[in-house]
Image (spheres, helix red, strand yellow):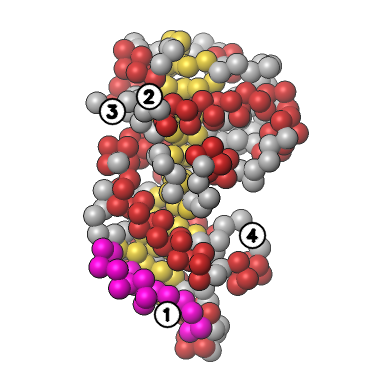
Amino acid sequence: MISPIALSCGDPSGIGPEIAVAAWDQLRQDCPFVWLGDPRHLPSGTAYQIVSEPAEALQVTAKALPVLPVPFAAPATAGAPIAENAAGVIAAIETGVQLVTSGKASALCTAPIHKKALIDGAGFAYPGHTEFLAALAGVNRVVMMLASEQLRVVPATIHIALSDVPKALTPELLRETIAITASGLRRQFGIAHPRIAVAGMNPHAGEGGAMGHEEGDWIAALVETLARDETLTLTGPHPADTLFHAAARARYDAAVCMYHDQALIPIKTLDFDRGVNVTLGLPFVRTSPDHGTAFDIAGRGVANPTSLIEALRMAQRMAESS
């Protein structure tokens, strides 16, 4: 059996601790993981067992959540993030990276963080989890994939205004995105010959220049050039409005899209609760649930753990394929 997964706690004032407990209740030894955080932040009455190494999680009794303690400055109040705990949140992520890069953990799964609390409390200098993990791993370029059993999508540009997409989307960016996606599908999903569909940027993929020119100016030529690589099947640019129905999805392993909503609307419509955030391009497996801290429902016992469960299961499968 591979090593357990390291699950960083995320912001302890969000739903991270309670969905970790719910995930353990469902997964336990089928998908062993160790929670990195402060036991004080777990829901009242949680059965847990302190471990010093992830491997000890394999011997933990069935009902006890394995916890590798990470010190935090203060208790947590559900729904109210505090800056004093920012250093602990960061330390939990760093600990997870150390465990996975040393081979003591098979993969890293990260619970949601609250960036403002990290900035206020620790001067966090990164836009989010992904960029911080890339810095810790010493890589310059990573790719965000949203994945479920029904669909895998990769946005080439992410959290920018739609009006900025034409300037940000360059041949170099798209080339790197496709290359990292293909490598990730091979290395972490076990797909020897990836099939990647590239969406157009404009309606009807530009319709011969009538609805936009980027496809004709360079996207089609780039796809044609990269498609000469016989180790993958690359097609496009495809009109995005016909790329995500069932028959179309059967023809590719992942779709590379031009901007955030073009990628995320289809997968969230098809499989809202089971979507998983995957970071490709890191030297280790990293997954995360596809939702935020949900401060508005934290501590009420109503948070849905499905996305975290799927993130842990996907991390396990990816680690086994790596």
Circle 2 or circle 3, nearest the eye: 2
* Type of amino acid under label 3: Ile
Tell me where residue 87 appears, x and y as whole percent: 66, 25
Question: Are dots 2 and 1 in contact, CB under 8 Å?
Answer: no
Disc 4, SS: loop
On the image, numbered disc 3 is attached to which residue? 2
On the image, numbered disc 4 is attached to which residue? 160
* Type of amino acid under label 1: Ala
Disc 1, SS: helix
Tell me where residue 191 appears, x and y as whole percent: 26, 53
The span from disc 3 to disc 4 (Cα, nearest Å) is: 38 Å
On the rendered structure, is 5 left or right of 301? left
Circle 2 or circle 4, nearest the eye: 2
Residue 19 shows in this picture: no
Q: Is residue 187 above or below residue 259?
A: above
Please report the residue visible at 41 percent of the width from the left and 56 percent of the height from the top: 180
Mark 3 packing: few (<14 Cα in 10 Å), some, or many (20+)?
some
* Type of amino acid under label 2: Lys
**Labels 3 and 4: the sequence-earlier one:** 3
What is the span of residues highlighted in magenta in the rendered image? 216-236
On the rendered structure, is 129 left or right of 315? right
**Labels 1 and 4: the sequence-earlier one:** 4
**Labels 3 and 1: the sequence-earlier one:** 3
